[in-house]
Image (cartoon, rainbow, N blue to C red):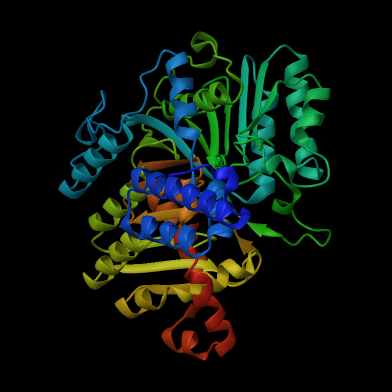
């Protein structure tokens, strides 16, 4: 039999090659996807829309980050992440918090095993309202630095806000402080002038995280670092959801453009923040930071809170943040408060929210009435009916756009950081959050959220039904694409 493909018609040859690539993509999907829903969705796209589906999967569905991250950890002398669930070395919640309820002891055990990160005690955590208060505190910290400054963020624009940070970083560099800046490769391109160029001209070591390459690898559009961390002298840190850009400052009339919340941290939790930065820096530019300089021993603050860092990303075997959120929802007995700009939870989180509400827990969810991503807002509203029917209460906050990311349970536990309630944050991006077991801080933040809820508008089933038919239909169509995100 003659199998010389050079004699095949061009159309048959192309069809054969497409079929081969489809088969290889299907094998990759079956080997790497851990959720049936996701695997079926990708298989359907690859086979029903071969050209578009294959390109879409190559760009958005394949993660080569895990292998590169594994090699970066090995070069640092660290064991690669295997996903093995084991208790980390460190104190238990009962050692840090007086007589904690059994449900929080169980939750803390789960969080420790999932993250392989111990609880820390003696942490002073202070919330910061809005861009100006947070930026002023961060720049003052940089100006006080004596040895090191480490900064990582998703968006860092060379605008009114960004140039203040560039100036502070340059002053620190000029007086001999070791400075490292890591900006996401996509976030670096916001605005007309990449801030990385401006930093390099000032002599500041800067790297871009996971840059797009015009090669066989193509661009990793989803695999972004969404972490926002500033660590000064290894002992003082800032974390939350704020990027560095003028959108977080007031306009000419003194009106806030964006509402947000950031946090100042002192104590041993800062060492866990620095460890996450060192991992990302080694991954991005292969420089190993000297532990003796960058990671000094940090003493606990008397009377400080118990807290744990949650560094999560697509290189991790487990979806840490999602599992911890689900466990916290299962631990709720009275009230759950959620503030997020992007709310599109997957099935497991939807189920956990419904179960909490059906147990009689008050579940209040605050999202912006006017989102900066209108299509995302349509998609989000298309999926909330079952939550409202189960008893969850949805509130729409009036402008300005609220970019805060907070979760509180029973005024006893809270989580803050960079993660949104969507697949992009919980599965596809590198995120950094902090869980905290501290009734005083939780009560303070509950007061902040309660004030926002009182100024917000409840969104009921009647409001869902009253939306224009075309808007509801478009939202449901967009909702169908959520498994691919």
Name the spot of residue 365 as percent of width and height, x first: 43, 67
Q: Is residue 438 above or below residue 203?
A: below
Judging depth in this view, the residue of 417 and 318 nearest the camera is: 318
> Which quadrant holds residue 374?
bottom right
Judging depth in this view, the residue of 415 and 3 nearest the camera is: 3
Judging depth in this view, the residue of 97 and 38 nearest the camera is: 38
Q: Is residue 60 above or below residue 87?
A: below
Identify the residue at image location x=35%, y=76%: 386
Q: Is residue 474 above or below residue 274?
A: below
Name the spot of residue 312 as percent of width and height, x first: 43, 39
**Count of all numbered marks drawn on residues in the image:** 0
Quadrant of the rendering where the N terminus is positioned: top left
Name the spot of residue 273 as percent of width and height, x first: 48, 29
Identify the residue at image location x=78%, y=15%: 174
**Residue 430 visible in the shown view:** yes
Q: Residue furthest front?
A: 1
Identify the residue at image location x=46%, y=65%: 450
User: In the figure, is residue 297 to the left or right of 117?
Assistant: right
Name the spot of residue 394 as percent of width and height, x first: 44, 73
**Residue 456 visible in the shown view:** no
Judging depth in this view, the residue of 32 and 176 nearest the camera is: 32
């Amino acid at each position: 039999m003659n199998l010389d493909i050079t004699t095949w018609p061009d159309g048959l040859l192309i069809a054969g090659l497409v079929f081969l690539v489809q088969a290889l993509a299907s094998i990759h999907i079956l080997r790497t996807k851990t959720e049936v829903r996701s695997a079926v969705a990708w298989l359907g796209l690859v086979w029903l829309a071969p050209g578009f589906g294959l390109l879409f999967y190559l760009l958005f569905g394949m993660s080569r980050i895990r292998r590169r991250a594994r090699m970066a950890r090995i070069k640092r002398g660290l064991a690669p992440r295997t996903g093995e669930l084991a208790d980390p070395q460190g104190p238990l919640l009962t050692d840090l918090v007086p007589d904690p309820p059994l449900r929080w002891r169980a939750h803390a055990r789960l969080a420790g095993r999932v993250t392989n990160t111990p609880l820390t005690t003696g942490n002073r955590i202070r919330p910061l309202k809005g861009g100006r208060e947070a930026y002023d505190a961060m720049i003052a910290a940089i100006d006080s630095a004596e040895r090191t400054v480490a900064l990582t963020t998703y968006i860092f624009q060379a605008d009114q806000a960004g140039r203040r940070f560039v100036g502070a970083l340059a002053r620190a560099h000029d007086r001999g402080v070791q400075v490292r800046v890591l900006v996401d490769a996509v976030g670096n391109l916001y605005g007309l002038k990449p801030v990385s160029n401006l930093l390099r001209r000032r002599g500041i070591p800067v790297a871009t995280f996971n840059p797009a390459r015009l090669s066989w690898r193509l661009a990793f559009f989803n695999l972004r670092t969404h972490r926002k961390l500033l660590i000064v002298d290894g002992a003082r840190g800032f974390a939350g959801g704020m990027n560095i850009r003028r959108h977080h400052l007031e306009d000419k009339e003194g009106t806030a453009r964006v509402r947000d919340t950031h946090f100042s941290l002192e104590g041993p939790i800062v060492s866990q923040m620095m460890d996450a930065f060192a991992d990302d820096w080694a991954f991005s530019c292969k420089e190993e930071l000297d532990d003796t300089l960058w990671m000094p021993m940090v003493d606990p603050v008397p009377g400080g809170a118990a807290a744990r860092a949650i560094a999560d990303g697509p290189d991790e075997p487990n979806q840490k943040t999602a599992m911890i959120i689900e466990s916290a929802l299962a631990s709720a007995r009275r009230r759950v408060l959620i503030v997020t700009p992007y709310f599109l939870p997957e099935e497991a989180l939807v189920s956990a929210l419904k179960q909490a509400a059906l147990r009689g827990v008050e579940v209040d969810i605050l999202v912006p009435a006017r989102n900066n991503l209108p299509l995302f807002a349509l998609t989000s509203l298309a999926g909330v009916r079952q939550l409202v029917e189960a008893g969850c209460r949805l509130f729409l906050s009036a402008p300005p756009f609220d970019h805060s990311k907070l979760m509180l349970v029973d005024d006893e536990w809270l989580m803050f950081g960079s993660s949104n309630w969507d697949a992009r944050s919980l599965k596809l991006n590198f995120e950094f959050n902090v869980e905290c077991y501290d009734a005083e801080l939780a009560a303070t933040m509950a007061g902040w959220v309660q004030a926002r809820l009182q100024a917000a508008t409840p969104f009921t089933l009647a409001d869902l039904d009253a939306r224009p038919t075309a808007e509801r239909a478009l939202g449901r169509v967009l909702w169908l694409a959520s498994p691919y995100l």
